[in-house]
Image (cartoon, rainbow, N blue to C red):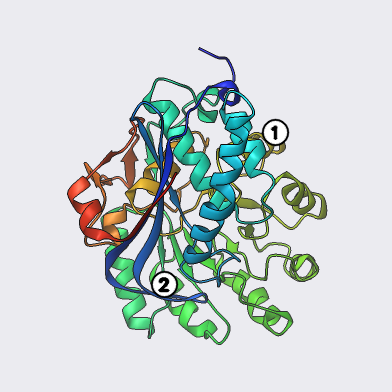
């Protein structure tokens, strides 16, 4: 066996793209918009021997969280990613490092290229190879998880839902916030749950005129305030830190690689990192960010994008390599969807933890076919 995951040989017969639509239990609302169902893109890597690896492209169907969206991802995969990989293979033996180098020519589109790399890594694991996580010690055989809750129409419904989730055993609850939300609404929630590990996530929706509101959040002693401003508003982060140094800041969309992480640390505007493996471009960058964060003493937790259990299982494997996290934003997909694509489903115990399953996912082929709305083969 080769020592480095990058050196492991691959073959490519075709890439299969499937768009699936999963019905949700309820509408989810955030500053980004409303989600009525999950429209997800799956990438299946078929090798020359009939083995298949699967990855999930975690971007939204619209370009409102990042510049990527499902329809655009399909175009990038079909017109650019697959031809680049095929060309790399035609120049010699194909391996994971060659795939990474080929996809590195594509600027932007990290969710999209990450899905291809995840599918390749999943394939290698299925045929007895190694991946980037093998070099990181397993810290948590039972992964602690939290839950992200959307915007509520009134305080009473928010309090009721938080009570239900606390009863379910979630170790941290994150509430979405946006401009126009009343501070009294959040004060009432905090009074009802004074000891709850409660955080707020703005999804980058605030600007200069929201600084006073954000500064006032410190009185609620939140576990963290996540991504208050747009990804490139380092100036506003610096001002918020100056005005409210006690407010714990968590960054998500602003951190897309080692450079942005080191910048955030250098100017002192990050207290913890919400690391989404798809958002940063896949397994290699994820492993590098975990190493850097551990070296710098920065707390990390793994976030999600409402993935199906395919993407959720992949993220849970990463979360198991994070030491000391209170909770990861990786509640079971069944919490959101009425149907799913893998067997057995991901399940959380009464202690708010999910048992780590290192085995490659087993697809529920009947559900996969039934929920597929688009399918194409890229030879």
Q: In this view, does 26 lie to the left or right of 221?
A: left
Q: In this view, does 330 lie to the left or right of 97?
A: left
Image-quadrant location for residue 241: bottom right
**SS for dot 2:** loop
Name which residue lies at 35% across and 65% down: 38
Q: In this view, does 28 lie above or below 278?
A: below
Percent x, y of residue 323: 53, 35
Percent x, y of residue 35: 39, 73
Q: Looking at the image, which is closer to me, 51 or 261?
A: 51
Residue 300 in view (yes/no):
no
Percent x, y of residue 279: 57, 53
Residue 54 in view (yes/no):
yes
Q: Mark 1 points at which residue?
A: 295
Q: Looking at the image, which is closer to me, 19 or 327?
A: 19
Q: Looking at the image, which is closer to me, 243 or 41?
A: 41
Name which residue lies at 68% across and 59% down: 254
* Mark 1–mark 2 CB contact (< 8 Å): no
Q: How far apart are the alpha carbons under marks 1 and 2?
A: 33 Å
The mark found on residue 150 in the picture is 2
Image-quadrant location for residue 25: bottom left
- Mark 2 is surrounded, within 10 Å at the Cα level, by few (under 14), some (14 to 19) or many (20 or more) other residues, namely some
- Which quarter of the rendered picture does the C terminus lie within? top left
**SS for dot 1:** helix
Q: In this view, does 340 lie above or below 31?
A: above
Which numbered disc flags the more N-terminal residue, 1 or 2? 2
């Amino acid at each position: 066996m080769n020592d480095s995951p990058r050196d492991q040989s691959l073959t490519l017969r075709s890439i299969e793209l499937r768009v699936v639509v999963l019905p949700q239990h309820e509408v989810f609302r955030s500053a980004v918009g409303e989600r009525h169902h999950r429209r997800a893109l799956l990438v299946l890597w078929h090798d020359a021997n009939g083995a298949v690896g699967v990855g999930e492209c975690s971007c939204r169907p619209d370009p409102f969280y990042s510049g990527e969206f499902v329809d655009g991802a399909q175009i990038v995969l079909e017109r650019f990613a697959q031809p680049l990989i095929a060309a790399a293979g035609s120049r010699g033996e194909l391996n994971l490092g060659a795939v990474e180098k080929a996809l590195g020519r594509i600027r932007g589109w990290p969710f999209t290229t990450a899905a291809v790399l995840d599918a390749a890594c999943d394939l290698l694991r299925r045929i007895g190879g190694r991946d980037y996580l093998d070099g990181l010690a397993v810290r948590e055989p039972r992964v602690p998880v939290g839950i992200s809750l959307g915007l509520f129409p009134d305080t009473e419904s928010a309090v009721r839902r938080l009570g239900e989730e606390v009863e379910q055993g979630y170790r941290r609850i994150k509430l979405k916030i946006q401009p126009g939300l009343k501070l009294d609404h959040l004060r009432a929630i905090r009074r009802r749950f004074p000891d709850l590990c409660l955080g707020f996530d703005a999804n980058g929706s605030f600007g200069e005129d929201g600084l006073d509101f954000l500064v006032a959040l410190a009185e609620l002693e939140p576990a963290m305030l996540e991504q208050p401003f747009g990804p490139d508003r380092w100036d506003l982060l610096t001002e918020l830190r100056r005005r409210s140094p006690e407010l714990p800041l968590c960054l998500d969309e602003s951190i897309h690689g080692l450079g942005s992480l080191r910048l955030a640390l250098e100017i002192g505007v990050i207290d913890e990192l919400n690391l989404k493996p798809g958002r940063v471009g896949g397994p290699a960058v994820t492993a590098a960010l975990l190493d850097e964060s551990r070296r710098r003493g920065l707390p990390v937790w793994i976030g999600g994008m409402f993935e199906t259990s395919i993407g959720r299982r992949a993220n849970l494997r990463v979360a198991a390599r994070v030491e000391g996290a209170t909770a990861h934003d990786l509640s079971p997909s069944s919490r959101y969807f009425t149907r799913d694509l893998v067997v057995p489903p991901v399940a959380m115990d009464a202690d708010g933890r999910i048992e780590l399953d290192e085995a490659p996912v087993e697809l529920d082929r009947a559900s996969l076919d039934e929920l597929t709305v688009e399918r194409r083969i890229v030879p």
